[in-house]
Image (spheres, grey):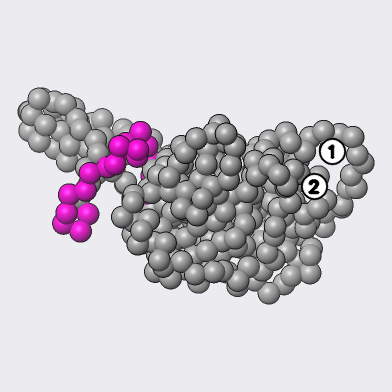
Amino acid sequence: MRGSAGASGGRGRGGGEKYRNPCLTMHQPWASLLVYGIKRIEGRSWPAPLTGRLWIHAASKVPDAETIKAMEEFYREIYAINGITDIKFPEHYPVSRLLGCVEVVGCLKSEELVCWEALPESVRLEGLTDFCWLCQNPQKLLVPFEMRGYQGVYNLDKRIYEAAVRGLCPVQCPQPVKFPLPDPQDPLSLRPGSLASYFSSSSTSTVETPASVSAAIAGARAAAAQFSRKDQSKATSSNQTDVIQKSEHESTGTSLNITMEDRRLYWFPNGRSHWGYQAHNHEEQKTTPENREHSRGCT
């Protein structure tokens, strides 16, 4: 049975209510740029598993000034193509916070997005990854919530959702975009491959990209790649340290609490480990069953 997401959750593309209050943890500055409506395309190596409201959470890694500068310059250049030069970027890029939400209306392959002439050129230039999640109607929280994140798309805790949904406010986007559905009767018609036949049977004009835009695109790609390399290097170093600490304490049978960015691992006298609890504001919080499978994520 097909259908669109409700106000509080997203519907999985395979049918059924797979997600109740879906949330995605993203690194900064990309997370805030999406919630502020500056970024319209969320690029991933995997297709969007849902349509409807998607909450956006900022990971714990603090972005460096060079990354922020490169991404802001990228958006300045691509918006300028459509004559938009007054872009109000976020004053701050908070981390480990729930920032707001967007509406995911579909997902396309990059080669489909870049040829879709129904969209502004600036949107088409955002198609830099294999799969492009089409996002519109951003809303931000007046007061971002501090919380823990996970990998992939996961369900937002019910209590956090109930508090967050009351604190949403509309966003003034530089260039609001509505993605037209190929089939207005089918809310899931914007899916990978859905526009491929159209572009293969019609001639699409090619727009020459200015040198400044090409440079901004290259800078954005380099910033994302460098950010990813730093993240992987940090994770590798952290894992090596964890293995050493585990070896030192397993032989003694003592209890050890290892904090790894976004999660806590408890070692008990029998040498077994237990995931799923974190100390926050002096209270013990247990991970919900639907999030347990994502417990090796990032904050």
Residue lying at 14% horizontally and 37% vertically, measured from the top left: 256
Residue lying at 52% horizontally and 63% vertically, measured from the top left: 139
Q: Secondary structure at mark 2?
A: loop
Q: Amino acid at mark 1?
A: Phe
Q: Mark 1 Cα within 10 Å, few/some/many (few <14, many 20+)? A: some
> Within the image, what quadrant is residue 238 found in?
top left
**Quadrant occupied by the N terminus:** top right
User: Which residue position is annotated with label 2?
Assistant: 116
Q: Provide residue 191's location: percent of width, then percent of height.
A: 67, 38
- Asked whether, in this view, residue 206 is left or right of residue 28, the answer is right
Residue 37 part of the magenta segment:
no
**Is mark 1 in CB contact (under 8 Å) with mark 2?**
yes
Q: Which mark is residue 199?
A: 1
Labels 1 and 2: the sequence-earlier one? 2
Residue 193 in view (yes/no)? yes
Q: Decide: is 172 above or below 40.
A: below
Q: Amino acid at mark 2?
A: Trp
Q: Provide residue 78's location: percent of width, then percent of height.
A: 73, 60
Q: Nearer the viewer, residue 149 or 197?
A: 197
Q: CA distance from mark 1 to mark 2?
A: 8 Å
Q: Provide residue 261's location: percent of width, then percent of height.
A: 31, 46
Q: Decide: is 261 above or below 75.
A: above
Residue lying at 56% horizontally and 69% vertically, measured from the top left: 171
Residue 292 part of the magenta segment:
yes
> Within the image, what quadrant is residue 249 found in?
top left
Magenta-colored span: 280-299
Q: Nearer the viewer, residue 229 or 33?
A: 33
Q: Which mark is residue 177?
A: none
- Asked whether, in this view, residue 125 is left or right of residue 37, the answer is right
Q: Decide: is 240 above or below 153.
A: above
Residue 296 in view (yes/no)? no
Residue lying at 83% horizontally and 51% vertically, measured from the top left: 117
